[in-house]
Structure formats: structure tokens, C-alpha cells
Amino acid sequence: MKAALLLAAGMSSRFPGTNKLLLEYRDRPLIGWAAEAFGLAPVDKRILVTGRDRALITQAVATYCAAPFDILHNDAPETGFADSLKLGLGATATANWTLLLHGDMPEIDGALLQDLFAAAEPDAYAIVPSLAGAWGNPAILSAEAAGDAAGLSGDRTPWPLLQARRNEVAIVPVQSKAIFRDIDRPSDLHW
């Protein structure tokens, strides 16, 4: 089974007073772009992980995602990324592969997700896109990597786990900088 997590529980700490995922970006809320890719991912199960503004985020994702998805809510997103990740991975524990899609990466599209899943190697620990030798997002975790990532805490991400086993990571060369582009600061809204 293949699963996708759309991680939308961040605190938007560099956007004081607002949830960046709900800000307008190229004719829709920022989360709408990731939601569209989420709906096009070649997976069997989709999980949206929300934090603050749960109803508004869910509504925006439902508007732009063309496939059904389940919703999990992190009641304490301020504790860090790992808790949202752990929550989502708990719901995809039976998946062979789990895509980690970030809600603030508007240029990731369905074609890239198709290419990443097509590169799945049975023995790979994870799958990551790469441009000019640099790894980017989104990553796809094997069942083993997902189990390891579920043990993280605080604001830790799975990247150190993947780096530690880099010889077991399937690298998918891409030609797009989309794998590096996330909206972290207000200035990023004006690329």
C-alpha cells in the first residue's frame, strides 16, 4: 500500500498573526497548490494533518484535492514537526511507502509525485528527488524509514535518518527547483 501525508500543522512562526497556508498565492490559498498535488499522488490512502485553523485548512484542501482524504488534527502543533509526522505515520503504519508532502511547497505537482513513486526500489530506505546533487522534498519513506521517523520528537525531521543511510536512498534526478521552494517568509510569496 502507498500513502501520502499532507503536513499542514506548522505554526507559521515567520508570519506573525496569520497562518501562511491560508494566504493567497497565485490565485488560491497557498495550501491549495499542495492539495492539488496531494489529490494527484498515485497512492491508496491520503491523510491531511492539521494544526491551527483546522476547519479553514480542511476546506481549502477539499476545494483543490480531487481525491478523498482522511483528516488528523494535532492539538499541540507548537511542540514541533515530529509530533505531526508521528500522528500521520501512525495512520499509515501498514503502508509500504509514505509520501511526506509539505503544505508550503506550491510548485510540487502530480507529475513529480508520479516520477518519485515510479522510482521505488524494493530495498530502498527512502526515495528523494535531487537537482545537481542536492536532495529536496518531498521524500517518500519506506515502511522501515517511517517506523524510524515515528520515533522522532520535537522539531526534528527525518532528514538525518535518511542522510545516515544515504547509500540505501533511491535518488530521482529532476530538472526543477520546485523541490527546494517552500514559503518560509513573507518575501517568498513574491517569487
Image: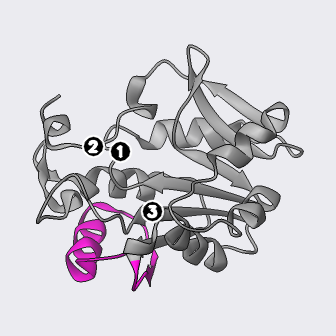
Position of the C terminus by quadrant? top left
Asked if the residue at tag 3 contacts the one at tag 1, i.e. Cβ–Cβ closer than 8 Å, the answer is no
* Residue segment shown in magenta: 51-76
Gap in angstroms between the C-alphas marked 2 and 3: 15 Å
Q: Which residue is mark 2?
A: 183
6 relative position to 143: left or right:
left
Residue at image coords 41%, 41%? 109
In the image, residue 149 lies at what x, y percent? 69, 61
Q: Which residue is mark 1?
A: 105
Q: Nearer the viewer, residue 73 or 116?
A: 73
Q: Earlier in the sequence, mark 2 or mark 3?
A: 3
Residue at image coords 60%, 68%? 153
Q: Earlier in the sequence, mark 2 or mark 1?
A: 1
In the image, residue 22 lies at what x, y percent? 17, 62
- Which mark, residue 6? 3
- Which mark, residue 34? none
